[in-house]
């Protein structure tokens, strides 16, 4: 009976075997191939989940590296050849990042298996030598394979690291080109970027896309130049298939697709979003793609191993004794205590994240910056408080403020000083800042958002020409407690960031007769200490809408909501 069954099955087995044989002999290019990419960026030191308080969205916690890893791990289990891309601003933005000069983030993210890395401007915060120690060479603490086509070593005038790499994945030749931001964190002082020369990427983008395109089947760019700049570059030089962007903290729930076919994606900030891109090829020709932006919220379970590692990294920072041993690498001030300690109260939600179509859009103003400038103005006794419109920060729900919240807002270690400026200089600062944030060309933008102010109000017409966007500028009069028109020749005192390297400047702006905020021991206080001292006697209840929009911001260019309207 067995012989009879075998006799009848033999032809079937021969056919199956023949098909398998011929399939194995076919050129791999004839097969359909799926390749997966996962994109993270602008984590800004956030190890833990944080509140989401953005207008119009669910008020649940988002982010957290343990949740983020759950998604990464799931996608890698589905495709072991998955490529994980990190587009920078990773090792700045928290106390854990600052006091370990980035190592706390590196220790956790090394477990993610990052394949390619385009550093952000704030990843240079701890200097060239520290960056090399963390990321460059065989002995690097973080083997993330940094790619930068627009950064040069001033000693040799050669590229600091490789501009691109070609990798064969499932028989498909993929080219990866990397770009860092042209804005190194020079606000901290020139020594931070000593030995490095940053390019705006215009020349290099064209050069390397043109050079690499004929050599590869798929061309991928990873760039921290910001979405507006990346769109401009990709329009000017076609040939890029996919561009993973960071820098502006925009969220592309749907990718930006240019007429020339380039697809761009950006994933917000603080590890609250993750991009998943799957592409399909046949005969090494791209047939199509599918993109999904994952929201890293409470629905995503934490990976227990990463959660334990995060807890280990944070342990000394939440310990009453060990925490006080940490020294700020810039101000040289000791951490005052556990970072999870409650140090004050806010009576409003603190953040800067609102999309452009809503009231008080983030590009114009944020309650977090309003609070910080109030602290600078009050603690220094100045007429005006000032802070740059940084994109980094966190969301603090109405109620308790913890020490670590301040370090998410001020993660560098500046001192606070009061100096004198005439009204004309203040007017010029407002106009220069508006041009840098709202210019119609990406090349004219200078990074960041509008400055935050305390004790100063003004009207803003974003559609006006350069130099004429602000009007009705008023300053709080200390005696009458009313707002009076800014006088061009009058001298005002202004309080903001001040560094040892630039003793005559606040916020990179020249001022006269500078004096730093001191404590009872006559010691200069850094900005987090100034904010903490303010919270001892005041609740955070900042007045909002200090900048009044006369016209709405430009409507979104593509299908996504925008924070900073694209040119």
Image: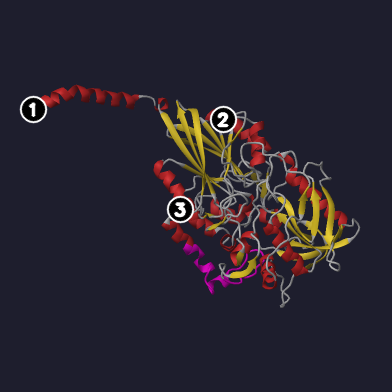
Q: Which residue is mark 1?
A: 1
Does 257 lie within the magenta span? no
Q: Which residue is mark 2?
A: 213
**How far apart in space, not on screen, are marks 2 and 3 (Cα)?**
32 Å
Mark 1, Cα crowd under 10 Å, few <14 / some 14-19 / many 20+, is few
Residue at the (66%, 63%) spot, across then down: 413
Camera sees residue 29: yes
**How far apart in space, not on screen, are marks 1 and 2 (Cα)?**
63 Å
Quadrant assignment for the N terminus: top left
Q: Secondary structure under badge 1? A: loop
Residue 105 placed where, x, y %? 53, 57
Mark nearest the camera among 2 and 3 is: 3
Camera sees residue 189: no
Mark 3, Cα crowd under 10 Å, few <14 / some 14-19 / many 20+, is few
Q: Which residue is mark 3?
A: 111
**251 lies above or below 279:** below
Question: Outermost residue, right direction?
Answer: 489
Residue 406 placed where, x, y %? 63, 63
**How far apart in space, not on screen, are marks 1 and 3 (Cα)?**
57 Å
Residue at the (86%, 69%) spot, across then down: 479
Residue 72 placed where, x, y %? 46, 47
- The boundaries of the magenta stretch are 311-337
Image quadrant in which you'd find residue 6: top left
Mark 2, Cα crowd under 10 Å, few <14 / some 14-19 / many 20+, is some
């Amino acid at each position: 009976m067995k012989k009879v069954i075998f006799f009848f099955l033999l032809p079937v087995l021969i056919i199956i075997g023949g098909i398998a044989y011929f399939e194995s002999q076919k050129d791999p290019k004839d097969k359909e191939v799926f390749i997966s990419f996962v994109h993270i960026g602008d984590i800004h030191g956030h190890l833990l989940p944080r509140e989401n308080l953005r207008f119009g969205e669910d008020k649940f916690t988002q982010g957290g590296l343990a949740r983020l890893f759950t998604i990464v791990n799931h996608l890698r289990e589905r495709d072991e050849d998955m490529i994980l891309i990190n587009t920078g601003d990773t090792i700045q933005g928290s106390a854990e990042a600052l006091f370990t000069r980035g190592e706390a983030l590196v220790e956790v993210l090394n477990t993610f298996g990052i394949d390619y890395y385009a550093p952000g401007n704030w990843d240079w915060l701890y200097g060239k030598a520290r960056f090399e120690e963390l990321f460059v060479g065989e002995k690097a603490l973080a083997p993330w394979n940094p790619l930068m086509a627009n950064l040069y070593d001033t000693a040799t005038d050669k590229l600091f690291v490789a501009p691109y790499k070609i990798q064969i994945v499932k028989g498909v030749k993929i080219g990866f080109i990397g770009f860092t931001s042209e804005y190194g964190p020079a606000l901290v002082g020139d020594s931070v970027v000593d030995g490095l020369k940053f390019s705006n990427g215009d020349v290099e983008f064209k050069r390397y896309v043109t050079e690499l395109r004929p050599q590869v089947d798929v061309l991928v760019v990873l760039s921290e130049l910001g979405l507006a700049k990346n769109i401009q570059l990709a329009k000017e030089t076609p040939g890029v298939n996919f561009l993973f962007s960071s820098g502006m903290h925009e969220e592309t729930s749907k990718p930006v697709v240019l007429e020339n076919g380039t697809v761009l994606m950006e994933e917000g900030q603080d590890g609250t979003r993750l991009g998943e891109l799957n592409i399909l090829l046949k005969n090494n020709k791209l047939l199509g793609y599918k993109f999904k932006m994952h929201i890293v919220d409470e629905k995503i379970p934490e990976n227990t191993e990463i959660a334990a590692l995060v807890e280990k990294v944070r342990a000394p920072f939440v310990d009453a004794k060990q925490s006080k041993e940490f020294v700020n690498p810039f101000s040289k001030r000791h951490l005052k205590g556990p970072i999870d300690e409650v140090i004050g109260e806010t009576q409003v939600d603190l953040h800067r994240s609102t999309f452009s179509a809503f009231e008080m859009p983030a590009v114009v103003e944020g309650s977090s910056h309003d609070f910080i400038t109030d602290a600078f103005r009050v603690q220094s006794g100045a007429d005006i408080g000032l802070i740059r419109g940084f994109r980094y920060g966190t969301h603090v729900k109405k109620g308790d403020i913890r020490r670590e919240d301040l370090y998410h807002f001020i993660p560098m270690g500046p001192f606070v000083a009061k100096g004198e400026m005439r009204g004309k200089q203040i007017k010029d600062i407002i106009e220069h800042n508006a041009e840098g944030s709202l210019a119609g060309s990406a090349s004219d933008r200078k990074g960041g958002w509008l400055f935050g102010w305390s004790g100063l109000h003004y009207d803003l017409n974003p559609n006006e020409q350069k130099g004429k966007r602000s009007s009705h500028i008023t300053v709080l009069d200390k005696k009458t407690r009313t707002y009076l028109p800014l006088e061009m020749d009058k001298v005002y005192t202004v309080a903001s960031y001040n560094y040892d390297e630039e003793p005559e400047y606040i916020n990179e702006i020249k001022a006269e007769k500078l004096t730093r905020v001191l404590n009872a021991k006559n010691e200069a206080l850094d900005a987090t200490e100034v904010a903490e001292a303010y919270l001892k006697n005041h609740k955070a209840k900042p007045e909002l809408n200090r900048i009044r929009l006369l016209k709405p911001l430009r409507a979104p260019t593509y299908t996504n909501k925008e924070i900073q309207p694209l040119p």
